[in-house]
């Protein structure tokens, strides 16, 4: 969702803030704004568009001053307009605020404030924070912020800049992190916002307020009591988020899988032992996640049952209220999330915790709220994933699911860092790229695609469909191939485009029969398999796998590539799909 950054130090703030916003742009990218405090006055520049574009138009990085705050927006309340862009200030124009989250009681607060004579200049929920800060503003910034927070319901992380040069941040159910630099402080929604300047981070807890004045930085709880939070040293590698030789992050991250899958399979032994011990002792197991991470939960469930004889339920995090209704203190929830900040996932584990269940996490961002609040977590070790559509984090999650299952199954899967899928995934990238690029060019007019697969290939059909929707704006549906004749076959007609996932495993012959049924209705079939068949109109060859449970991690890569190249063929920006954000921190 939105990203926020504040800086107060000895360097020129605006270029630092613009650079931070570029690094965090994956969180939201419909508008940008910066407020600077200089010589006791407040200046704001903001507008719609991406960071580089708005900066060029408005000259944000030329703003002078040593104190500032900035924001990239992903619209929730109010359209994508200049006036809805953050920062927001109130009537006296002496405080500016940037916010991430949703203020649920903003309507009643707004009515109350208007009745008191306040004039609003945006349609956002966030603007009420600026007016509340103004009302409560006194000589003590801490009190101002506490009184404001006490009026807010919902979820928020906000940073406010005051005319006297003080910066304050507050956190409730949204992440907020302090960066401790040699010559200043940062306040950000992501360590990527300051990691290029310092690796020293303080993760604020829920209901923490940080106040940075001219002499010090202090942290208080919502009752104004000082609290001590440790300084954590964050791994510098987290900050290595450039595109390298690639035109887009998405293409880079697809290619990164040559290394990242092996990195995920290579796990810290003690964390793995602890994770498996907790999992092995559970009476009931639930696996939860959102979007792509939910698709890896589906595969995890299948292999746990098949190889480790562990029965697990999968629960979409956004449906956890019902899905976790029967959870108890003998249960374990495995939460899977690249970012570790997805609001629905965090809400699901809160529900689980309230019933006394243990929480295991599979995350990519090891400093995330999910990782820090879990009983034990394993890292997918993929490095930063910036492209909004998850690619390398998904295969990392699968590699980890294989590794955990392998351990619980006494090594039956052979899923360590030398696993068969590591080499196969590397090979498939080079094997498929030219054919897929060419095919995507030929298919640029397509508007509907059906992806069919049985058993372990069905979650991959869902994941492939999600990639096609996100990146190429194609209506795509993942269908369990066996369900074809129970409905979807009615949609098959001349030129309907179908991707059939039919590797040479136990599902192969049934899938080929389905391909015949589809072809008989005139559809065009793209086969993804290690076994060529004359039924396919187009064929994407993948490597043969001795362990058939590993096909999913390999066959998803051509689908990621198809979605990427189709996005290019349709002139869409694969890194920043319209209306989406990478880290969905609101429900
Ligand atoms: C967003 C992203 C998806 C991602 C999902 C879950 O919708 O656009 O790519 O799969 O969130 O994210 P998580 O960080 O929890 O894996």
Image: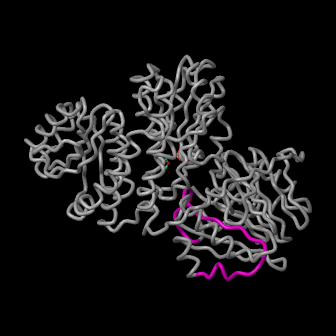
Q: Quadrant of the N terminus?
A: bottom right
Locate residue 344, reporting x and y percent: 55, 40
Please tell me in which quadrant of the rendered image residue 68 appears: bottom right
Q: Which residue occupies the foreground of this view, 499 or 49?
A: 499
Q: Is residue 343 left or right of residue 224?
A: left
Q: Is residue 264 magenta?
A: no
Q: Residue at x 50, y 27 (%)?
A: 407
Q: Residue at x 37, y 65 (%)?
A: 572
Where residue 51 appears, as percent x and y from the top left, is 56, 71
Question: How many labels were placed on the picture?
Answer: 0
List x then y, in percent, for residue 449.
25, 50
Which region of the structure is painted magenta? 58-82
Judging depth in this view, the residue of 347 and 22 nearest the camera is 22
In the image: residue 370, left or right of residue 479: right
Q: Is residue 91 left or right of residue 484?
A: right
Q: Is residue 243 left or right of residue 138?
A: left
Name the one closer to the observer, 128 or 119.
128
Residue at 51% x, 43% y is 264
Residue 4 pos. (x, y %): 66, 61
Q: Is residue 425 above or below residue 254?
A: above
Q: Which residue occupies the extreme front position in the image?
A: 418
- In this rendering, is residue 355 above or below 57? above
State the residue at coordinates (77%, 78%).
65
């Amino acid at each position: 969702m939105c990203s926020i950054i504040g800086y107060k130090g000895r360097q020129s703030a605006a270029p630092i803030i613009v650079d931070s916003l570029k690094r965090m742009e994956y969180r939201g990218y419909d508008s940008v704004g910066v407020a600077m405090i200089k010589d006791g006055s407040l200046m704001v520049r903001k507008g719609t568009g991406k960071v580089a574009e708005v900066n060029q138009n408005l000259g944000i990085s030329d703003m002078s001053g040593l104190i500032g705050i900035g924001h990239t927006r992903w619209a929730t309340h109010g359209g994508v307009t200049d006036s809805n862009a953050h920062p927001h200030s109130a009537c006296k124009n002496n405080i500016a605020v940037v916010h991430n989250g949703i203020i649920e009681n903003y309507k009643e607060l707004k009515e109350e404030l208007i009745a008191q004579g306040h004039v609003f200049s945006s349609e956002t929920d966030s603007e009420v924070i600026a007016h509340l800060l103004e009302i409560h503003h006194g000589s003590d910034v801490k009190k101002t912020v506490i009184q404001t927070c006490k009026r807010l319901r919902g979820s928020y992380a906000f940073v406010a800049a005051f005319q006297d040069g003080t910066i304050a941040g507050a956190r409730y159910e949204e992440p907020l992190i302090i960066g401790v630099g040699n010559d200043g402080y940062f306040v950000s929604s992501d360590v990527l916002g300051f990691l290029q300047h310092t690796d020293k981070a303080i993760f604020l807890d829920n209901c923490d307020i940080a106040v940075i004045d001219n002499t010090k930085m202090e942290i208080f709880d919502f009752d104004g009591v000082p609290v001590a939070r440790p300084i954590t040293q964050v791994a510098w590698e987290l900050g290595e988020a450039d595109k390298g030789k690639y035109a887009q992050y998405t293409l880079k991250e697809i290619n990164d899988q040559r290394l990242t899958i092996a990195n995920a399979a290579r796990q810290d032994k003690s964390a793995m032992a602890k994770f498996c011990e907790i999992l092995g002792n559970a009476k009931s197991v639930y696996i939860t996640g959102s979007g792509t991470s939910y698709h890896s939960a589906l595969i995890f469930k299948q292999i746990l049952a098949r190889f480790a004889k562990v029965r697990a339920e999968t629960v979409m995090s956004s449906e956890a209220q019902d899905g976790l209704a029967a959870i108890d203190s003998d249960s374990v929830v495995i939460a899977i999330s690249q970012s570790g900040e997805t609001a629905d996932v965090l809400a699901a584990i809160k529900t689980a915790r309230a019933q006394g269940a243990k929480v295991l996490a599979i995350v990519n961002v090891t400093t995330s709220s999910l990782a820090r609040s879990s009983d034990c977590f394993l890292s997918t070790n993929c490095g930063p994933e910036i492209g909004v559509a998850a690619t390398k984090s998904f295969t990392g999650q699968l590699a980890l699911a294989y590794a955990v299952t392998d351990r619980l199954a006494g090594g039956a899967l052979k899923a360590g860092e030398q696993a068969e899928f590591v080499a196969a995934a590397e090979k498939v990238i080079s094997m498929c790229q030219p054919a897929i690029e060419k095919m995507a060019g030929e298919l640029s007019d397509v508007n509907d695609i059906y992806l069919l697969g049985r058993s372990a290939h069905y979650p991959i059909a869902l994941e492939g469909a999600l990639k096609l929707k996100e990146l190429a704006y194609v209506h795509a549906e993942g269908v369990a191939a066996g369900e074809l004749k129970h409905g979807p076959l009615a949609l098959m007609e001349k030129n309907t485009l179908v991707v059939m996932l039919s590797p040479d495993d136990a599902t192969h012959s049934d899938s080929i029969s389905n391909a015949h049924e589809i072809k008989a209705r005139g559809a065009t079939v793209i086969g993804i398999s290690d076994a060529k068949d004359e039924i396919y109109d187009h064929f994407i060859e993948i490597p043969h796998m001795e362990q058939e449970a590993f096909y999913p991690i390999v066959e998803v890569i051509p689908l990621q590539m198809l979605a990427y190249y189709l996005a290019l063929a349709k002139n869409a920006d694969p890194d920043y799909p319209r209306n989406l954000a990478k880290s969905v921190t609101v429900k």
